[in-house]
Amino acid sequence: MKFCQQLSSYLKNKKYTGYRLYQDMYEQAILCDQGGYDSVGITEHHLINILMMPAPLQFAVKITGATKKIKIITAVAVLPIHDMRVFAGEVIAAQMFTDNRLILGVGRGAFACEMAQLDSPLEDSREKFNESLEVLQKLLSEEEVSWHGKHYNFESLTVMPRPMTENGPSIMMAVLDPEGIYACTKRGFHIMTTPLSGDHQLMLDQVDGFARAKAELGDKGKDLSISLSRVAFIVKNELDRKEKIEMAYEYYSRFDNVFTGPGIVNKGMIKVLPRKQSIEELTESLLVCTAEEMIDKLSPYKEAGIDRVILNMNFGASHKDTIQSIHRFSEDVIPYFS
């Protein structure tokens, strides 16, 4: 089982500055490359201070210059807010500039307030995403493409330059529903998913959807993978655990505001709102623990058939503590699963 570190892009305080935050992410990526991680993940979100990264492809290129082998996953690029005729060229250039280490994770968006401000309402994004993905694949795989649909209407054109590999970089689909995972795997996509609040049965169903489709594909599906995203942080002791869980609870008070709540944002900063979930319930769903406990909590994922775990430490821990957790993970956990 492999491991991906989602680079921490949560700006708790504007005084810290985006520049310092992105320098922190850069250092995290270098440490992951040195520490045996398979990949790092870069989010795409705009206009808000959580998961804050408006330029994932550009940041992927920056990381490449300071690393040797680590893969870089966009987790995820939000297709409905981009024009695929421009985005396809940007993807091709990023594939080249990252020396073919780019994995293009794609999704339709998650936060209604963000998508509305970008003229791509979330309630309409599924249809636009599906068409955008079809257009993108055609632009990457075919030299001359014309399209007449609802969201795209253009005569024959060729995106230049052409990809360095057939069909461009590998595409990873963000999807939760087990049958959706089955359908996307059958179409030849890598899968990125999460068991939401740590629901073990849901995780097993998600893996089953992937495994069934991969088996039906035979040799065509032998290289496909399923990645599972979990909030995970290695702590030093019980006091440290309590502190990190409290941080996570505040973070999710912001996250819920824009994910399922009213989307109250003041000058880019998401307001903390009361949560329905208790801190005790949140604790049960997080992997915030010692290295020894982490091995026990991750082992069922390997047994179930998960290929890669995406570790999300994006809840507001200091850069120093995040670096320490990454280091402990590379020293004490990754070797166990190698």
Image: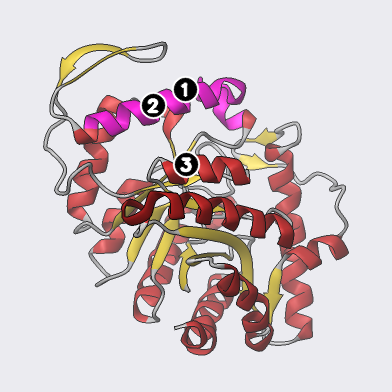
Q: Please indicate, yes or no, whether residue 64 appears anywhere in the rendered image.
A: yes
Relative height, residue 19 to residue 3 (above, below): above
* Label 1 sits on residue: 128
Nearer the observer, 285 or 225:
225
Q: What element carries label 1?
A: helix
Residue at point 61%, 53% (across, down): 206
* Callouts 1 and 2 close, C-beta under 8 Å: yes
Q: How crowded is mark 1: few (under 14 residues within 10 Å), some or many (20 or more)?
A: many
- Give left or right: position of 205 versus 100: right
| Among the two numbered marks 3 and 2 on one chain, the one whose residue lies closer to the N terminus | 2
Nearer the observer, 312 or 335:
335
* Label 3 sits on residue: 184
Horizontal and vertical percent position of residue 20: 45, 60
* Label 2 sits on residue: 132
- Give left or right: position of 153 versus 251: left
CA distance for labels 3 and 1: 17 Å
Given the image, on which type of amino acid does mark 2 rest? Ser
Residue at point 26%, 25% (across, down): 85
* Callouts 3 and 2 close, C-beta under 8 Å: no
